[in-house]
Image (cartoon, grey):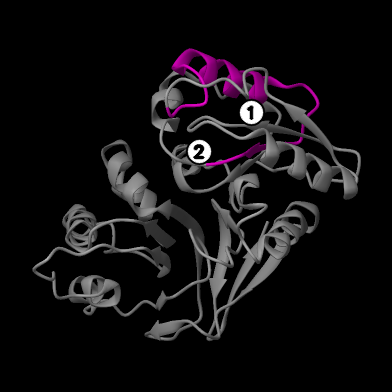
Amino acid sequence: MYHLPKIQKGDEMVLVSPSRYVEEEWIEKFTELLDSKGFKTILSPNLFSRENQFAGSDNERIEDMQWAINHPTAKAIWAIRGGYGAIRVLPHLNFSTLFNKPKWMVGYSDFCVFHIHLNNLQFPTLHATMPIHISDRQNFITDFHNTLDLMQYGHGVLDLTTAIYQNKANEEGILVGGNLSILYSMLGGLTKDFFKNKILFLEDIGEYLYHIDRMVQTLYNYGVFNSLSGLLIGSMEDMQDNKVPFGHDIQSIFESKLKRFSYPRVYGVPCGHSNPNGALFLGQNAQITDNQLILNY
């Protein structure tokens, strides 16, 4: 098991964008915010490069991620945004330096490519807000502080009092998952044991309901849901439908496959492409109670 360093004031954090291009405004504001909290910001060398929708060419983004992984003093690698592109970078990276000298890997959305890959290797990561939201999310500052708290203190609690439960129970397990579309696209590289006794978290944005059903059906056929300790469904933002309605909402899509299972399933977890976006330790132990998710590192 890998152990991440608890961050302290004065520590350095590298900002990267392995997917879509970034705006200088986000970087400036986020750098000022980190500086006000006593942390130092390091920008990856090609951060402001752009090739169509990407933050530079594949080679530039690979170079930046490898540079961040190999950085000798930084304690965290924080993604500026998601989009699409990380899967083009992942196969070309060497993570040996990260395993020998662990750093926090922070982000969500397309950055879940790294969460899933690293959690599959038993390396913990942090599913959390990103600098792109510094101006467009009312709860960004709260999400940011919660993220820093987890990195500084190693534990946290997520309030689930407004969530909808199926099968309330007190269950523990290693928390894994992230974006549903990303997990679906990477499923073939994961063993079925990856999900055994795990608490699985899933969220998504902008998908058609029939495609959510296709992905859930595929996970079901693959046996993903068979041996979980629990299931957490986060925000499912901006779901789309056809002119002829699909006829099922998110909860009914999942429950049509899962009602035979007795483990707790929680809908409306305040994490993902939502406001707020609660921070989650992935690859680490978590506990579902009647109204909380307890996170420990």
Residue 59 is inside the magenta segment: yes
The one of 231 and 204 positioned closer to us in this rendering: 204
Mark 1 = which residue?
A: 98
Mark 2 = which residue?
A: 118
Q: Which amino acid does label 1 sit on?
A: Leu
Q: How crowded is mark 2: few (under 14 residues within 10 Å), some or many (20 or more)?
A: some
Q: State which region is magenta.
A: 53-81
Residue 103 visible here = no
Q: Which amino acid does label 2 sit on?
A: Leu
Q: Residues within 10 Å of mark 1 (few under 14, many from 20)?
A: some
The x, y position of residue 269, in whole percent, is 49, 72
Q: How many labels does the image show?
A: 2
The x, y position of residue 209, in whole percent, is 22, 63
The answer to whether 27 appears left or right of 90 in the picture is: right
- Tell me if label 1 and label 2 are in contact, CB under 8 Å: yes
Residue at position x 31%, y 80% in the image: 262
The C terminus lies in quadrant: bottom right
Residue at position x 17%, y 61% in the image: 210
The x, y position of residue 129, in whole percent, is 61, 53
The residue tagged with tag 1: helix, strand or loop?
Answer: helix
118 up-or-down from 138: above or below: above
